[in-house]
Image: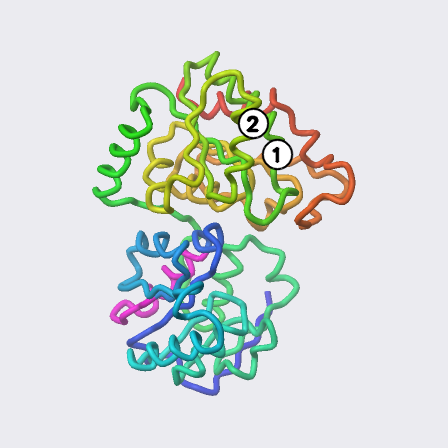
Amino acid sequence: MKVRISTRTPFDRAINILIRGTNWIGDAVMTLPAVRAIRNTFPEARISILAKPWVAEIFNLCPDVDEVIVFQSPGPHSGIAGNLRLAKELKARKFDTAILLQNAIEAAIITWLAGIPVRAGYNSDGRGLLLTHSVQRTEDVRKVHQIQYYLEMVKSLGCLSAEANVHLHPENEYENLSEKILSEHGIRREGIIVGLAPGAAYGPAKRWFPERFAAVSDRLIEDLSAQVVLFGSREDRQTTDLVEQHAHRPLINLAGKTNLKEAIAAISICSLFISNDSGLMHIAGALNIPTVAIFGSTNPVTTAPVGERSVVIYKGASCSPCLKETCPTDFRCMDIISVEEVCKIARGLLPQ
């Protein structure tokens, strides 16, 4: 894989590094090996991550990071005035190097305004002139798994390699938090706990049918006496409510009731997780929870969960992966995934 990097500024003396994290939960999980590669290369450096509030907890769980700086947008860092305020705050911290995992031009503008002398990242979004170390984003690198996509960028900058696996290891406080969630929502720790994530932020084309999630839930409850917990954000609540309406057995609906930290704590106690291609799917995989990942419009080659106990269901319809938010035809990529198949794979992932 050919990459091109400009080296107008020294990159080998970094002692105070700012990493601009990605904005989506799944993407944040998939950048963690790249963060590890940066740490391997600069073991004595102070490494800070600049991240939006809704992904900050992912980086708080990363042992390679010394500090998480919250990019408060919406909030005081919103808009031009907010970006200028953030740049001033970053300038006061005297970073010598910025590595931009996020592809947007905004990241390059803010770090340039902050006067950070070394600014490195992919030359995407027309920002190449704002970077001192610009890595060409080739067609080949766009086709690999997102973990490799980010690893290739930092390797091109001269960073040491790192393993592509992702493991989240919640601290003891997560155990206390999970116990609190169990108690508040009447979830029994004993037996099988199945998490369902029927939503997906990008759009409805990524969502398997709510009635089929409901049918899977009913069967696992009837056959295995499982407790089924619905996960998602406030925006997913309409979808999780539809699953509840179609289900014949009672479910525990946590959608919109947990922040990311609480969701991680709750997912960590699940025996099994069944999800569309979503950020919660990546969290379950990184927690090494047995995970059934349902793919339709998106490409598992680039975004499959990396958990060692994750199984992808993807039929590869003639029109998929289309990467569209809304299906323009008959939703065949999801229609050909049956309840029976999902149940069979789910049972196979549980201890016998």
Q: Where 183 sits versus 27, above or below?
A: above
* Circle 1 SS class: loop
In the image, 91 versus 309, the foreground residue is: 91
Is-magenta flag for residue 33? yes
Q: What residue is drawn where x is 34% and y is 81%?
A: 91
The circle on residue 266 is none
Q: Quadrant of the N terminus?
A: bottom right
Q: How far from the left and from the top, in percent, is residue 101?
A: 47, 66
**Residue bearing mark 1:** 208
Q: How far from the left and from the top, in percent, is residue 59?
A: 35, 56
Q: How far from the left and from the top, in percent, is residue 261?
A: 33, 46
Can residue 87 be seen here? yes
Q: Quadrant of residue 32?
A: bottom left
Query: Magenta span covers which residues?
Result: 31-48
Residue 207 vs residue 257: left or right? right
**Residue bearing mark 2:** 213
Crowd rating for badge 2 (residues with CA inside 10 Å; few <14, some 14–19, many 20+): many
Coloring applied to the structure: rainbow
Residue 304 vs residue 252: left or right? right
Residue 163 vs residue 172: left or right? right
Q: Quadrant of residue 319?
A: top right
Q: What residue is drawn where x is 70% and y is 30%?
A: 335
* Circle 2 SS class: helix
Badge 1 amino acid: Trp
Q: Where 160 sits versus 280, above or below?
A: below
